[in-house]
Amino acid sequence: MGHECIDASKEFKWGDDVKSEVTEIVLVRHGETTWNAAGRIQGQIESDLNEIGQKQAVAIAQRLGKEERPIAIYSSDLKRAKDTALKIAETCFCSKVTEVAELKERHVGSLQGLYWKEGAEKEPEAYSAFFSSQNDLEIPGGGESFDQLCERSMNALEQIAKKHKGERVIVVTHGGVLRAIYMSITQASSAGKLLNASVNVVHFSDEKWIIDSWSDVSHLSSIGFLQRGFDGDAKP
């Protein structure tokens, strides 16, 4: 994909002479949806924010509104991400949210619309493919492989980073995309839980990616969140 991906320790700091070259991207997972709460597999199917998800969107917007103002806000073109992004845009005084189709959730084939608890029985091949360590394996029913997801997610993110060199932007996306980004940057075998309305900060400079912070939900202390989050590494 034309870039080097590296991990960073908490002690890593950009030098003052290169800060102006660094793009800061605040990655946000959308707020909780009705299907998240029900344990239903969304993929690229639409699902609305539920009451908790709407409160989460307000909470993350209030948090980001107190931080450095972003130059732009980007979002997946799926409604649950757009609705979260629009709340953030209001608080951050951004006039628009730019939709990027390549930031949408992974297409998980014939698993879409099923409940996680019934996936293994009703669509065993697709279920097995989703949790497979074979990253080039496409999910039956028109789904993407993990490699395909990583490629489109990182390409979209790199385009945004290069467009906003030295600036701060916010990107609202999905658990599967965040997992792909984390594992692409760190080369780790697992991304752990990706929580609704979490804040995840990455930096890009000189074709290198650095993770600054990950899975911060401190702004949700009075609202709560689904503890199980999105976990593409462990079967429910």
Image (spheres, rainbow, N blue to C red):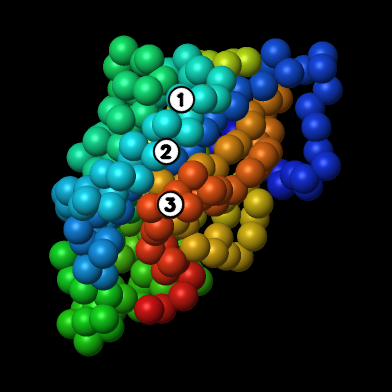
Q: Is residue 19 left or right of residue 58?
A: right
Q: Residue at x 18, y 71 (%)?
A: 114
| Whether residue 150 is situated above or below residue 81 in the rendered picture | below
Disc with the residue nearer the chain's start (3 vs 1)? 1
The percent position of residue 176, horizontal first and vertical second, equals: 40, 54
Q: Residue at x 42, y 38 (%)?
A: 60
Q: Label 2, on which residue?
A: 60
Q: Residue at x 47, y 14 (%)?
A: 71
Q: Residue at x 54, y 48 (%)?
A: 218
Residue 222 has which mark? 3
Closer to the eye: label 3 or 2: 3
Say which amino acid is labelled 1: Gly
Q: Label 1, on which residue?
A: 65
Q: Is residue 9 left or right of residue 79?
A: right
Disc with the residue nearer the chain's start (3 vs 2)? 2
Say which amino acid is labelled 2: Ile
| Whether residue 225 is situated above or below residue 29 in the rendered picture | below
Quarter of the image with the N terminus in it: top right
